Image (tube, rainbow, N blue to C red):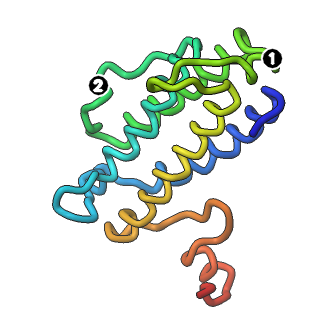
Amino acid sequence: MFSTIDEFLAEWANECQATMRIFKELTDQSLSQKGYEDGRTLGFLAWHITNTIGEMMSKAGLDVTVSEKHYDEPESVEQIISEYEKQSQAMVKSMNEKWTNETLDEDFNMYGETWKGKMILSALIKHEIHHRAQMTVLMRQAGLKVPGVYGPSKEEWSAYGAPAMK
């Protein structure tokens, strides 16, 4: 968990970069990729990651607006990237204006439960990581390059002239 806003913001900046690496490998055609018949699509997962920023953080008192088309899958990767950047920047700006380190220990009503501010921030990041991981599986199925996030991907090992780790 985070003990300062600056710790969160540094971690958030890293996670945003990782998410953007994933999003930038998507194609408009790949957004319909599913793992199974009733499964979520790549587009749905990317849009869900994007809109969760506003959904969660507005419950925590920050000025972040959820897209009007929150439940509609996007039509283009460009739309996802643009909205993701917008929501992330709005969250950071509002957090810098409204939250202090003491806010991390305040209670917020989240989904019918009481969560501390620091738990909300931790959950936001874990949520994003969880769905990014789901996306990488669907990206492989769609034949897309999967960028490394916490270490080299298979393609990146090859670029280094080394065999992929097994």
Compared to residue 120, the image places residue 96 above or below, namely above
Relative vertical location of residue 17 with respect to residue 124 in this rendering, above or below: below
Q: Percent x, y for residue 93?
A: 66, 17
Q: Looking at the image, which residue is at 29% across and 37% down?
A: 74
Q: Quadrant of residue 37?
A: bottom left
Q: Label 1 amino acid?
A: Glu
Circle 2 — which element?
Answer: loop
Q: Position of residue 98 (x, y in %)?
A: 70, 9
* Disc number placed over residue 63 in the picture, else none: none
**Earlier residue among tags 2 and 1:** 2
Where does the N terminus fall, quadrant-wise? Answer: top right
Element type where label 1 sits in the image: helix
**Residue furthest front in the image:** 113
Depth check, mark 2 against mark 1: the one in front is: 1
Say the numbered circle drawn on residue 69. Answer: 2
Residue that badge 1 annotates: 102
Most foreground residue, 60 or 16: 60
Q: Amino acid at mark 2?
A: Lys
Q: Residue at x 73, y 14 (%)?
A: 99
Label 2 vs label 1: CA separation?
A: 34 Å
Q: Quadrant of residue 103?
A: top right
Q: How many marks?
A: 2
Q: From the viewer's perspective, is residue 98 above or below residue 26? A: above
Residue furthest out toward the left: 37
From the image, which quarter does the C terminus lie in? Answer: bottom right
Which residue is rendered at x = 42% and y = 57% of the image? 135
Q: Which residue occupies the foreground of this view, 85 or 70?
A: 70
Q: Circles 2 and 1: CB distance less than 8 Å? A: no
| Residue at x 67% of width, y 88% of height | 162
Give coordinates of residue 52: x percent, y percent: 46, 32
